[in-house]
Amino acid sequence: MKKRFPLTHLLALALCICLLFALGACQTPLDSPQSGQTSSPATSSQTTSPPPGGSSMVEPPQPVISGVTAENFPRIDGSTANLPLIAQVYATVCDVSLEEAQTMVNTNGTSSAWRNLVYDECDMLLVYEAAESVQKDIEASGVELEITPIGRDALVFLVNAQNTLDNLTQQQLIDIYTGKVTDWSELGGQAGEIAPFQRNAESGSQTLFLKLLMKDIPPMQAPTELVEGMMGALIDAVASYDGSGGAIGYSVYYYVNEMYQNPDLKLLSVDGVAPSAQNIQNQTYPLVNDFYLVIRADEPEGSPTRLLRDWLLSQSGSEVLAKAGYVPVN
């Protein structure tokens, strides 16, 4: 005979089963997504929103000079020997490579650069001293300029490497360029005619030659074949003249030492002092002269040109000069 469960027991069992199903339907598994949320490997409490006041964007680099960019960078002209400096300034301020900057800048030479500033063909000069004829043109124009020394260079004399002399005095150089001395043997060298090269009248190095060495003494008129219009041409001519060491010429230290080196040449000491960056800085080398930063006096305050000028005259500007291999005034 089969055993029967009391009805009350069956009702109690059914009630328990119903309660278990109800509890299971109300619970949410810990690893299941909540309503309105998507699943993520990270915990659901994390957020990708930036913190209050913060930003997930990378800040753009700050300009070297506030108010000066590649788009409004001033038009700079100057002497040939200052071209590397202009390129270094552009590279630093516009945050480009020096190689790219070198393709973006150019100069027209000392005399043309001064005239270009007067006639508003450029905004700023990094330039050597103007020739007397150019200074007269500037005065006649009535344009006022702000001229500030920024770097220091020197007039240097160069001869063929075969020349046995390493030093000449200023007086001996004057004697050569006035025609008083015409043979190297008169100066203690090997016998041979001296061929003294000069630059064209309005070049920067010719201006320094007349100012620093000749002063009030007029040099002799050089034969046409011994007058060179470009500094590089003079250097090459002195190096190759007549296949011997008979030629002498001059340039500025930075150009011949940094920009247009020629292994067939050597620089002469003057009055026993060799031309070097240190001797130019401390001015123990006797033929030293400054070069200049120039803008028009009516350049507005706050303009990119004046902002760049002020920066170049600061410690940062001096560091740029030194980085480019020049000797800063300060």
Image (spheres, rainbow, N blue to C red):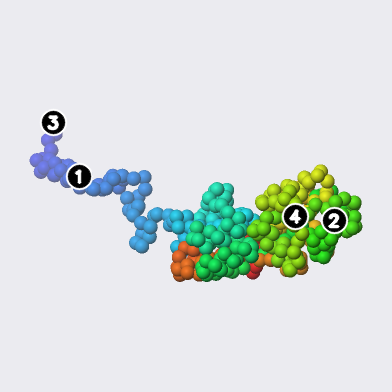
* Whether residue 319 is visible: no
- Residue behind mark 4: 222
Q: Position of residue 136 (x, y in %)?
A: 59, 66
Quarter the N terminus occupies: top left
- Residue behind mark 1: 25
Task: Please name whichever residue, 20 or 14, is drawn nearer the observer in this view of the structure.
Answer: 20
Q: Position of residue 159 (x, y in %)?
A: 79, 53
Which residue is depicted at the point 62% across and 63% down? 133
Q: Position of residue 210 (x, y in %)?
A: 71, 64
The amino acid sitting under disc 3 is Lys
- Residue behind mark 2: 182
Q: Is residue 188 shown left or right of residue 156?
A: right
Q: Nearer the viewer, mark 1 or mark 2?
A: 2
Please, which residue is most extreme toward the top here? 1
- Disc 1 from disc 2: Cα separation: 117 Å
- First in sequence, mark 3 or 4: give its number: 3
Which residue is depicted at the point 38% across and 57% down? 55
Which residue is depicted at the point 60% across and 55% down? 109
- First in sequence, mark 3 or 2: give its number: 3
Quarter the C terminus occupies: bottom right
- First in sequence, mark 3 or 1: give its number: 3
- Residue behind mark 3: 2
- First in sequence, mark 1 or 2: give its number: 1
* Whether residue 178 is visible: yes
Q: Quadrant of residue 250?
A: bottom right
Q: Nearer the viewer, mark 3 or mark 1?
A: 1
The amino acid sitting under disc 4 is Ala
Which residue is depicted at the point 84% across and 61% down? 180
- Disc 3 from disc 1: Cα separation: 37 Å
- Disc 3 from disc 2: Cα separation: 149 Å
Task: Please name whichever residue, 118 or 99, is drawn nearer the observer in this view of the structure.
Answer: 118
